[in-house]
Amino acid sequence: MTEQNSPQEVKEVHIQQAQMTRDENGVYLGQAIFGVDGHQSVYEITFHSKRGKEWDYSLHFAGESRVEEEMLEMDGWIEENDDLFDYLLDAAWSKLPE
């Protein structure tokens, strides 16, 4: 997916791994590990939803390289861009066992 933050800055997001589970109470828990062109850091986003409609998320570092400024930038992009959030959530959702 191509993520555009400003007219001059285009970043490519690369999903490395994703998963989603649903427990016996119907609570969804998902994760996507991804990298972004131009960032040293690799990220893990964790999704949580009680019913699969409204989602909370948490963003963490997933790899060895950890650049705090990149994490803050990535979190801002996710907050501001519904398409990016949906792209990451869809990657996890696609791994939900039937």
Image (cartoon, rainbow, N blue to C red):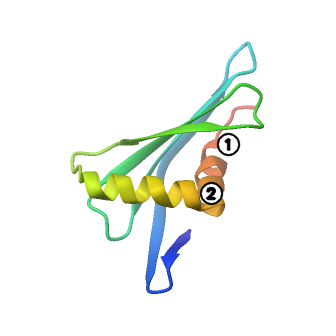
> Marks 1 and 2, how far apart in space?
10 Å
Q: Element under label 2?
A: helix
Residue 66 percent coordinates (x, y): 23, 49
Q: Is residue 90 depicted above or below 95 in this figure?
A: below
Residue 11 percent coordinates (x, y): 44, 73
Q: Element under label 1?
A: helix
Pick the front one: 30 or 83? 83
Q: Is residue 10 depicted above or below 93 in this figure?
A: below
Badge nearest the viewer, 1 or 2: 2
Q: Residue at x 62, y 57 (%)?
A: 87
Q: Residue at x 66, y 50 (%)?
A: 90
Q: Name the residue at the top extreme.
A: 24
Q: Residues within 10 Å of mark 1 (few under 14, many from 20)?
A: many
Residue 34 percent coordinates (x, y): 44, 53
Q: Residue at x 78, y 37 (%)?
A: 53
Q: Is residue 81 depicted above or below 30 in this figure?
A: below
Dot label at residue 93:
1
Pick the front one: 56 or 2? 56
- Mark 2 residue type: Tyr
Quadrant housing the N terminus: bottom right
| Residue at mark 2 | 87
Q: Quadrant of residue 23?
A: top right
- Mark 1 residue type: Trp
Quadrant housing the C terminus: top right
First along the sequence among labels 1 and 2: 2
Residue 96 percent coordinates (x, y): 68, 35
Q: Residue at x 70, y 22 (%)?
A: 27
Left or right of 35, for residue 85: right
